[in-house]
Amino acid sequence: MNEGKIVIFSAPSGSGKSTIVNYLLTRNLGLEFSISATSRAPRGQEQNGVEYYFLSPDEFRNRIAKGDFIEHEEVYEGCFYGTLRSEIDRIWAKGHTIVFDVDVKGGVNLKKIFGEKALTLFIQPPSIDELRRRLVSRGTDSPEKIEQRLAKAGQELAYAPEFDQIIVNDDLAAAQAKAESLISSFIGK
Ligand code: ADP
Ligand code: 5GP
């Protein structure tokens, strides 16, 4: 396997990570998204094999036992997420740089595995109040789920210093431009 580079995004839910990643994927940087597996149910218009590989809890456990994951976490109670080794092979085989959207623990673990091949970016919301507003206006989670995500955000923010770069997502266009410039220079190295 011809190994390439990887870019890892982590952030509290609602920080704007997906918005920024989706923008970057349109920018001809040679990036390709690593599709994670999850045991949670699809949300809104999500499709199997596009946003995630949706597995039942039993299927997820079986694939852990087979050693199919390079990393996996129970990000929310009862909801498992993980990166399949096959995803990394699939994307590097095409000569692309892999983009990961993983929780903070997954981000730190992947950095330990990939070292200098990896750039880790932490997307920080301007405040917890603004995070709440974004989760409410996104309209994809129940009030209960939103509270669960906000409760976790405080612990997640404590991981920010472990990342290579912190991008505060206040003005979206500025955050997107900063991410693009950091990734371009990392890939060019
Ligand atoms: P995440 O992937 O981190 O959970 P999303 O990308 O889904 O977050 O963003 C959460 C919500 O906030 C979405 O409705 C998105 O359109 C909005 N959003 C993202 N960035 C900004 C920003 N800089 N200012 C205001 N709203 C934003
Ligand atoms: P959501 O349910 O909003 O799609 O994602 C919830 C959280 O799971 C996000 O923080 C996301 O980054 C994280 N996540 C998604 N895929 C993976 C993965 O493969 N591994 C880890 N560790 N976290 C993941």
Image (spheres, rainbow, N blue to C red):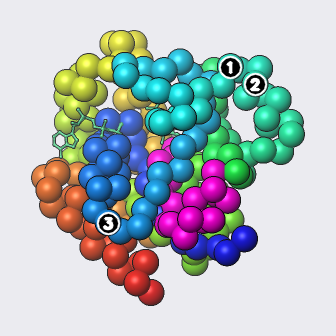
Q: Position of residue 55 (x, y in %)?
A: 66, 25
Q: Which residues are magenta?
A: 87-104
Which residue is drawn at the image coordinates 77% and 20% (left, top)?
Answer: 58
Which residue is drawn at the image coordinates 83% and 45% (left, top)?
Answer: 67
- Give me the C-alpha separation between circle 3 and circle 1: 35 Å
Instruction: Identify residue type, mark 2.
Output: Glu
Quadrant position of residue 75 = top right
Please identify the quadrant where the C terminus is shown. bottom left
Instruction: Identify residue type, mark 3.
Output: Asn
Secondary structure under the numbered disc 1 in the rendered image: loop
Q: Give the residue furthest to the bottom.
A: 189
- Give me the C-alpha separation between circle 3 and circle 2: 35 Å
Q: Where is mark 3, residue-wise?
A: 28
Residue 56 has which mark? 1
User: Quick check: can you spot residue 123?
Assistant: no
**Does 60 appear in magenta?**
no
Please state which of the two labelled residues, at mark 3 or mark 2, is closer to the viewer.
Answer: 3
